[in-house]
Image: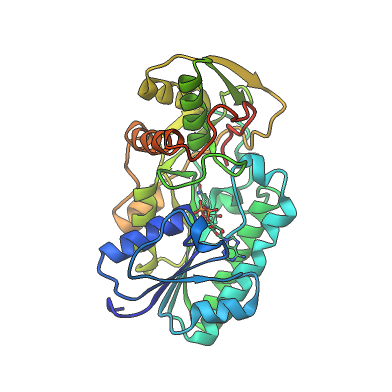
Amino acid sequence: MTKDDLVVVTGAGGFIGGHLVKVLQRQGHRKIRAVDVKPLDEWYQKHPGVENQVGDLALLEPCRAAAKGARTIYNLAADMGGMGFIETHKAECMLSVLINTHMLLAAREAGTERFFYSSSACVYNGDKQTDANVTALKESDAYPALPEDGYGWEKLFSERMARHFREDYGIATRVARYHNVYGPHGTYDGGREKAPAAICRKVIAAKLSGKHDIQIWGDGEQTRSFMYIDDCTEGTIRLTGSDIIEPLNIGSDELVSINRLVDIVEKIAGVKLKRAYKLDAPKGVRGRNSDNTLIKQRMGWAPSTRLEDGMEKTYRWIHDEMTAGKASVVNMSPGHAIAAQ
Ligand code: NAD
């Protein structure tokens, strides 16, 4: 692939897609098409020199328009959010299958050579995630299948479809299983946000309002790992250019509890908050971490940004957004999500 070949990023108005377009541009790609269903003024990032296209990729025709002439496609478009969203919008999550089906069909028609698909750690068998003291999940733990209901089943099915498009039609499909990605320029309110952004928002709101308490979903002892966005984009580009045909974990292996994540954000903010635990809120699995043995073996690389460093940058960005008047700090509902995918 040369820097003049067309690269398409779907879901480019969203969090990871917006960052990916920026990194591809920095790497010297001159022809990038960014596609999303949202109107342009709602995209988290827009980059000059990029062909921005608005279209509903659940439908075949917009997928054809998106894929036309593409040598490589990064398919990140999906209807998704944090645990508060995916546990209550299972049908909507499963309908992302239309995006993945139509994008693969369109890529095949367009003669696309490489196709990246963003799967998730939510494909892993739930029975292996019942203890907060987790054994990290390795790629083979997806089978026998018992993924997250709705969102996870759709991801596992679409992984499988990507595999068969490779085997039957010769498209070089590459599949990443992302583990909770966080960073600036993502959702931090409205109900689709994930734990790192939600915690930053709530700590900032508490600090600004002087009301020093915070509500946490579950008992806070559930564990996760969180990957900083720069590691995510780097891993995505490396995987897409590689010869690794099996789905691969792209995630941090720095395990933390949600309580520890709150400690980190409190330290960045310089406050100490009174914690209230909402035990009946959506919490997801009890514990989850990424086993990075395979990615290290195959790529000689793995995500390495320390959580405290990534959270510092994320906190600063959300703080700037909230204090610039883009969100109503005072009216922020205290019940908003602090859960992890
Ligand atoms: P995001 O919600 O910020 O971005 C997804 C984008 O897809 C949105 O901008 C949305 O408008 C767009 N989209 C939805 N339906 C569409 C449609 N019909 N046509 C065109 N665009 C459509 O999410 P993200 O965090 O950037 O996630 C990107 C991908 O990575 C998704 O596939 C997601 O499932 C996967 N993933 C993300 C995480 C994470 O922690 N962020 C973890 C695991 C997997």
* Closer to us: 156 or 103: 103
Residue occupying image coordinates x 41% and y 43%: 183
In this image, 334 relative to 198: left or right? right
Residue occupying image coordinates x 60% and y 29%: 331
Which quadrant, please, contains the N terminus?
bottom left
Q: Is residue 217 above or below residue 85?
A: above
Residue occupying image coordinates x 57% and y 71%: 55
* Closer to us: 205 or 160: 205
Which quadrant, please, contains the C terminus?
top right
Could you tell me residue 158's position as x and y percent? 61, 65
Residue occupying image coordinates x 67% and y 55%: 93
Could you tell me residue 335's position as x and y percent? 65, 28
Q: Is residue 232 above or below residue 132?
A: below
**Residue sitting farthest toward the front:** 325
Residue 238, located in which quarter of the rendered image?
bottom left
Give the image quadrant in which the ligand numbered 1 is located: bottom right
Q: Is residue 334 above or below residue 90?
A: above
Could you tell me residue 144's position as x and y percent? 65, 53
In this image, 244 relative to 91: left or right? left
Q: Mark yes or no: residue 293 visible.
A: yes
Residue 49, located in which quarter of the rendered image?
bottom left
Q: Mark yes or no: residue 144 visible.
A: no
